[in-house]
Amino acid sequence: MNAPTQIDTSAEDLMANAIRALSMDAVQAANSGHPGAPMGTADIAAVLFNRFMKIDPSADKWADRDRFVMSAGHGSMLVYAINHLLGYDDMDMDQLRNFRQMGYRTAGHPEYGHAKGIEVTTGPLGQGFSSAVGMALAERMHNARFGDELVDHYTYVIAGDGCLMEGVSHEVIDFAGHHGLGRLIVLWDDNQITIDGSTDVSTSMNQKMRFEAAGWHVQAVDGHDKEAVAAAIQAAREVTDKPSMIACRTIIGFGAPNKQGSHSVHGAPLGDEEIAAAREALDWPHAPFTVPQEVYDAWHAVSARGRAAREAWETRLTASAHKDAFQTSMANPDAAALDAAIDAYKAKLSADAPKVATRKASQMALEVINATLPNTAGGSADLTGSNLTMTGDMTDVTASDFSGNYIRYGVREHGMNAIMNGIALHGGFIPYGGTFLIFADYGRGAIRLAALMGVRVIYVLTHDSIGLGEDGPTHQPVEVLASYRAMPNLNVFRPADVVETAEAWQAALKFENTPSMLSLSRQGLPCLRTEHVAENMVAKGAYVLREAEGGRDVTLIGTGSEVEIAMKAADLLAEEGIKAAVVSAPCFELFAAQDDAYKTSVLGDAPRVGVEAAVEQGWAPLLGQNAAFVGMTGFGASAPAGELYKHFGITAEAVAAAAKELIK
Amino acid sequence: MNAPTQIDTSAEDLMANAIRALSMDAVQAANSGHPGAPMGTADIAAVLFNRFMKIDPSADKWADRDRFVMSAGHGSMLVYAINHLLGYDDMDMDQLRNFRQMGYRTAGHPEYGHAKGIEVTTGPLGQGFSSAVGMALAERMHNARFGDELVDHYTYVIAGDGCLMEGVSHEVIDFAGHHGLGRLIVLWDDNQITIDGSTDVSTSMNQKMRFEAAGWHVQAVDGHDKEAVAAAIQAAREVTDKPSMIACRTIIGFGAPNKQGSHSVHGAPLGDEEIAAAREALDWPHAPFTVPQEVYDAWHAVSARGRAAREAWETRLTASAHKDAFQTSMANPDAAALDAAIDAYKAKLSADAPKVATRKASQMALEVINATLPNTAGGSADLTGSNLTMTGDMTDVTASDFSGNYIRYGVREHGMNAIMNGIALHGGFIPYGGTFLIFADYGRGAIRLAALMGVRVIYVLTHDSIGLGEDGPTHQPVEVLASYRAMPNLNVFRPADVVETAEAWQAALKFENTPSMLSLSRQGLPCLRTEHVAENMVAKGAYVLREAEGGRDVTLIGTGSEVEIAMKAADLLAEEGIKAAVVSAPCFELFAAQDDAYKTSVLGDAPRVGVEAAVEQGWAPLLGQNAAFVGMTGFGASAPAGELYKHFGITAEAVAAAAKELIK
């Protein structure tokens, strides 16, 4: 916790100016990008890295590294410049010369997974900050399990005015203050400029007072006074029971003598003339994309310090009694143990065949999962008793005790999802969190980033249709499933019963690089999967739940709570001598990934009727040419669930009638 | 501005207890609902209505009424009970007896348009509060045009802990403080309870300090001390240059002696036993759904006072020199004037055929529209120069001058959309606001409510595909169009050129009860509609842009920036003797509403190729059986736009190849 000693600060001006020069030159070469933020925050970054950051570019995934998040992601050149200067082996000068070009790692905004040392994808404002809260939370939770010996790092954020204007910032500021995340240090780039001009065009917020209201430790400094910045960071590090915000008053585009301090420098190249003037003003006579060795030496000293720290940590890990448990926590979950536990649970289920809501089935599955996997981290956005996300063995994560595994996210869906991104990115835990399906949309921005980054976050989304009943159309999703099925790299599971719910959880947990949603019913649903329980059929996306003896006249396809309706419709049709197969389709994405032979075996060549208490959009690949759909065409209504199903015509009778119309 | 005089306060206890009794009885009858909030806030509501509210139930849409918003919409019984007691003619006791039942106006959450006196649909937390900020803004803007004589009312909000935890609250608190919305008075139901338990489970926010940091006038009172509540409201009314927040410390479920103050009373019926105990505790011996005449009399006095105020206002309006202008502002826009202006503009366009980005085309159309319609209210979430939402004649709306018509929403997409809902609901203005298409999702919660309520809000969403280029996948929508096409009662327009953009605006402005999105390009697009410019073809949803002479071999269907690609593909095919028609499909929803004959005439019976720089989902109704789609299958990338189109295979060559494959 003490400040690093014997740091050479003599080259910090050069360290900062190297960031500035590389940033303005790269933006100019691309003829696209944002020079203002990297030039304005270069001094802060130079101080932070030179005096405090603990990272080792030769081991970029080292668990105990400090995390640095450039939440103002449009300032991506700050990250690329720093990572080049530090010596990351995938960030040579060619990457900087080709900023924002096809096939290079230097994307317009920092993209997690594109290059080493990018902790989180940023750009959509507020997301980096919010995910950093998740990282800082995960650090304390991990620390509570493995101690200072193995887990002892900080999360630093540079956030812009936009990050602090976005609503999600409020959610996570309150959350971080409530949880006393003392290892979180946010450096606010207080440049008083947004795209539309001066910040006083649109805000009068006293940010210092605002953060203090949330229980943060707050300081304010001149962001170009390196000693002041360093002293503030040091003071922030020493406050262990509160997150810290340091308001760094900066000049946007610092160093561009004729444009700095104006929104003209925010998001456009400076131009050759101003770049020449900046070189003069900064006393940086070097050619574009040229950095003197003494500057590299100064940055490499940061890397060397980090490498030494990492090697010392490796030694501690090797000697630690916690070594195996620590490594297990950072690895993929034990698939064999998970499979064995789920298989045993399913075998029991198929005997009992309980009728339960799939939200309850989710809780039952979680009882098995949480007892099997040591590092799930559950939670809910203030709907614990409705989402049924807490299991018997869970305890709350609190500011005074981070050893728990259940997170009270509050009424903060966006914050929850962004924090879960941060937890997943930090490592050590598999986060899941609950809200109503309709309120997934409040946190959609963070779900999209989970899909884009490819992180394992699991959304437990209950009350998933008009089946929630009386709460009415504000709470009844009709378009939500379609809207998320449209999103790349996101698995949308809608299990039909207690067995499928267990299989959906099992499948979701194994996707290391794809987030998953579980769409779950409020209302009770019969156990339909009483056979073939040995195999995870949900993992195939869709499967034949009931085959039609002697060839199909029609195939009925349902998801979730409507599979029961399809089964009843098949019974009705059988009474009339019509042979109907029933397909359960709990995950369209996974079905799309099956081979054609399997798809054909499931869908058959008979006419098809789809049924889902939602809009038809997205069903085309399952329905094909000669098909009908029974579902919703508009918003829901407020009434008991059974009446709503009748009112909107989503019934076994309607499905049977649609089938007969198709085959007549 | 002075407090109403000679108010009889002697019956306020009874007025409040009537709310409590009706609420607990209705929730019990429904066996579903939330008694806690209405019982806890009944005293506040009784004081507010009895001493301050200016409403006339016999003229529920009276422009100068005070607005009351129950932002904690789960407490809907408060609204229904009050509206029954006030004598709204559509809220008889039968409605209350059938709370949350099919076909009744008393939905689980208050639904705008279901019953009189419901100013906004609430339930999704934070939305009511945020829309109320829009109402209070519209009031000041309208006042700046028509003076105190015609526009002089307050907006009152009851907000719960959840409303204040949601991120959108931050956005609008900052906005309201910055704009000095002195006519906005927020009564915070500070009951220290959320669904998961005590608020200290998840928040440590000092709300008073938080609001003060945003420039609000803040007070705190005992929410069951009626004189204290009245004094605070009166003081809040007298502060004209700041919005006011009154923290009302309440006991949730007040009056239920054994359950009050606990989260058990939040969202479940009290049960017969506790209801009996509450009747005893409240000294309310009356049978369920029975209200003594003296209590009705007290509530009806509020209505009578409002009626007198409304009649006096009508007299002032009749005598006012502003009468016509005022009525015009509250009515639908002058369609004839709009049509004439757009027609003249289009005729000129077809001669010039300018190549412009559709975002620029939108600004050009707005120059015409804003010069024609007196009451558009534009704005942007800090992307004015990118969205091109400001026209030459516009001036900013500021705290010191509300006569402008351009709103600086700041980096607050969710707040912007919710505020626009409030402006539209208030009346007097047609709001439109801009951001990037990708960031529509940050404000999706409010867009859904606009669609559900059916209000005229227009979203100007630029940078609508990989065509934005270097900003990369965080900023490139691929699933966004599909996700909004799935939403009921929302028109998604994606115009192809400068003419279609004008037509999209023209169509959108005429939809009184449907919000519209305009999906607009960053990149320049040629003018393709050089013929048939007299008719608004966009209003038909899709149309034949180029017919194939002598019968079609294939039909190419594109939207927005990809119509140009379809046209080029048709040229390529023509070189090979293949006759391709090109259909532009700027609005799937409006095309779906056309008759079958028109649809068939447009789509034809040749094979079809769709092209859109987005995912295929949602295209099924246009493509039919023998079809191909050229578009995106995953997230985008960071590179110049032209390279991205090539990289992802969205080119004229690819469309032509797909066509040839289909017809070979």
Image (cartoon, coloured by chain):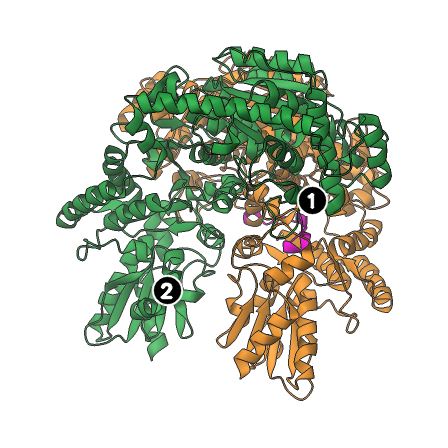
Chain colours: A orange, B green
Crowding around mark 1 (Cα neighbors within 10 Å: few <14, some 14 to 19, many 20+) is: many
Q: Amino acid at mark 2?
A: Gly
User: Which residue appears at 65% of the width and 72% of the height?
Assistant: A583
Q: Report in which chain the residue with disc 1 lies.
A: B
Q: Which mark is residue B503?
A: none
Instruction: Give the image location of residue B590, x and y in percent.
Output: 37, 56
Q: Quadrant location of the N terminus of chain A?
A: top right
Instruction: Give the image location of residue B531, x and y in percent.
Output: 17, 57
In reply to whether residue A1 is colored magenta, the answer given is no
Question: Which is more N-terminal, label 1 or label 2?
Answer: 1
Q: Is residue B657 something one can see in this rendering?
A: no
Instruction: Give the image location of residue A12, x and y in percent.
Output: 51, 19
User: According to the image, label 2 marks what residue?
Assistant: B610
Instruction: Give the image location of residue B145, x and y in percent.
Output: 33, 22
User: According to the image, label 1 marks what residue?
Assistant: B97
Give SS at disc 1: helix
In reply to whether residue A455 is colored magenta, the answer given is yes
Note whether A606 is above or below A655 in the view shown. below
Pick the residue in front: B656 or B119: B119
Marks 2 and 1 belong to one chain: yes
Q: Amino acid at mark 1?
A: Arg
Note whether A512 is above or below B40 in the view shown. below
* Residue A566 position by quadrant: bottom right
Q: Which range is magenta?
A: A452-470
